[in-house]
Amino acid sequence: MSTFLSHVGRFSARFRWVVVIAWLVVFAALIGVFAIGSSSGSGDTAETSIPDSAASLALERMNDEFPAAASTGASLQLVFAPENGDVTDVATAAEIEAFLADAANLPGVQAVTDPLDAAQPYISEDLTLAVSTITYGDLSADQQIEYYDAALALQENAPPALGVELGGNLVPLGAPEPGIGEGVGVLVAFLVLALTFGSLLAAGANLLIAAFGVGVGLMGILAFGSIVPISDNSIILAAMLGLAVGIDYSLFILSRFRNELRGGRSVDDAIARATGTAGTAVVFAGLTVIVALVALLVANLSFITEMGMAAAFGVLIAVLLALTLLPALMRFLGVRALSRKQRKALERGELWNEGQKQKRGIMRGWGSVVVNRPFISLLTGVLVLVVVALPLLSMKTAFNVPGGADPASTERAAYNLVLDEFGGVQSPLIVLAEGDDVASSTATIESDLAALDGVQRVIPAELSADGTFARIIVIPEGGPIDDSTKDIVHSVRDNADAQPGVHLEVTGETAIGIDQDAQLMEALIKYIIVIVVISIILLIVLFRSLLIPVIATLGFLLSVGASFGASVAVFQWGWLDPLIAAPQGDPMLSLLPLLLVGVLFGLAMDYQVFLVSRIQEMHRKGMDPKAAIREGFARSGPVLVAAATIMIVVFAGFATSTFAIGASIAFGLMVGVAADAFIVRLVLMPALLSLLGKAAWYLPKWLDRILPDVDVEGHSLDAKEKNEEKEPILVG
């Protein structure tokens, strides 16, 4: 592979203008497809599909048998919790009636219920709460925003003494505009690059490739989305990951290019060599990320698959640009990619030798500390990761957060007020009874349901036209994500056939949400197994070792645990509420663990490849294991630290978003990258390699014969150069 990639790099450098123009044409073509697709009026809403569950199948049957029960149109709630504590007080009731009259005049409103109507009251037993429903009917996307803003303005201007909260939301959850944090993250990344390279031109070229890659990737996704609707989450993840890996991949190749220049190679030869060696590692690292993201297919959830595919496309673009457009830019830069000090040394004939022993430095010193004290380093690193991961033990997940994603919103306040006074009336369970004996069994079924723990009340059954189905509403005491509500669902299913001649199913949004959460957790376990197998296979091929892949994979699992634990502490416990703008205090969304595992796997393998491949290279040159670790650290450590730091600051910028999903993904990735790069790869890995010694590189001979040679070190390039040197020159 290294030989092929070196030819790609040399070709891109030689025909640099062709490469630049070709990529600009691709970018322009994607913009054109997006513009045409957008103007054609294609669908603008991505639908979420999940595998059929017991609850979703039951809902389909219920809608067939009880068509009138199917929800139509949109609605909101006005919740009144007056300061005087009595909604029936004459003065308070008059204010409520006046407010309801104003609500009836809101744009798009079809009906407003009166909670004080004696015929159909909706007030709490202690008279402290009243609830009115505003009905709208079917709304377009523009109407949803306009009508909700109008209702929100009415609530905000309500008399304070009425304690009015607006429940529900007409507007689907979407991503807000990018904030200042993302821009700050990119600026810090540029600063890190400038300090790493000592050259503003090199840093600018690196960042330019990454930014252009994000642009091409996003336009490709948006062009596809103009034909087949995609979600905002897919775009956010693709942008976040594409920017991070785009910077890293260019950083690794550009660093190798600079080293080759310092070693005395010509610009074209340095480009070819860098693309052939570091480019091979980039291809392998990018492949692991892509495989991990595509493997999200095992979850069998459309929106998860969509996010994985979009992010994988962004990573693919980053790899292609690093192998083609970057060599073209490196040819434009030439020796100006070096710092001024390095250029002067080159002019004096002072060449940098790749094989010479590195001078003492921070990374060499760090590697020596870990190698000399492997037991202490190993125990300390594991202890830190375990402590950070401890909050994972109390992790709660939910497919949807009831009452909206913001605990401080009026929507959540309204939801909690109703929940406290009326139980789970906003999220009822629907029990569908089916059988020839349903009509004669409804009383017994209702009695059994009412006797279950956690049930507040049972609404009498409604029979279907042919009398073979009964629809029974069960109001739980808790909300849809409470354990008591989940226990009701499980209890009904466990006793689904207890009544002779009747079968029970549980459905409704609450039951479907519980099933979806369970499906995602099952998918997570399956996904972890899949990528662990992928990890071990890929690393065995790359490093030609049995133990190193196992160590690398165990380290990845520790970094994932730290990511989960920190995410729970912040977004579930609210530890950083003053610092993180996104809402905190909610359970972790069910999709988050899957995404964190997938992305962190790819990034962890990146760091493993870039660090250990250098150690492997030193070991194959004859160094003993400990010396190889020190030298590998000295060569690849600074670049890895810079790459990880860039990742962290980029993700930290996205973590400042007010969008809960985007911020939680970015924060989890930020912690996971920090844990994996600075503890797993720079502490645990060298410590274990030091303890294992030569055994770390053991591979059975039969396996060694059948494995392909990836050749990250560029041995085929060395052999080619030696053959060219030996080839006789014929004189005519």
Image (cartoon, grey):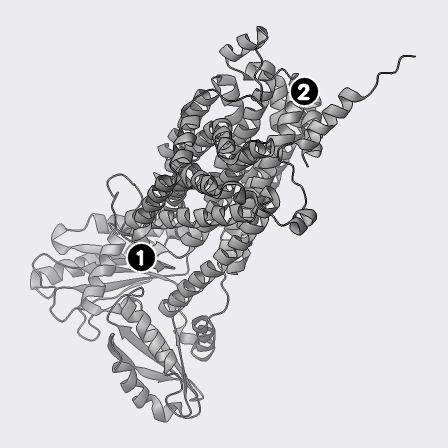
- Point out the residue furthest to the right here: 732
Q: Is residue 550 left or right of residue 74?
A: right
**Element type at mark 1:** helix
Say which of 586 and 611 sits in front: 611
- Label 1 sits on residue: 393
Is the N terminus in the top left, top right, bottom left or bottom right quadrant? Answer: top right
- Label 2 sits on residue: 268
Residue 284: percent from the left, percent from the top? 59, 40
Residue type, mark 2 in image: Asp
Residue displayed at 25% across by 45% down: 575
Whole-number angstrom distance, CA of label 2 to CA of label 1? 54 Å
Residue type, mark 1 in image: Leu
Residue 538: percent from the left, percent from the top? 58, 47
Residue 448: percent from the left, percent from the top? 29, 85
Is the C terminus in the top left, top right, bottom left or bottom right quadrant? Answer: top right
Residue displayed at 29% across by 47% down: 570
Hey, which quadrant is residue 416 in on the image? bottom left
Q: Is residue 208 left or right of residue 274?
A: left
Say which of 352 and 672 sits in front: 352
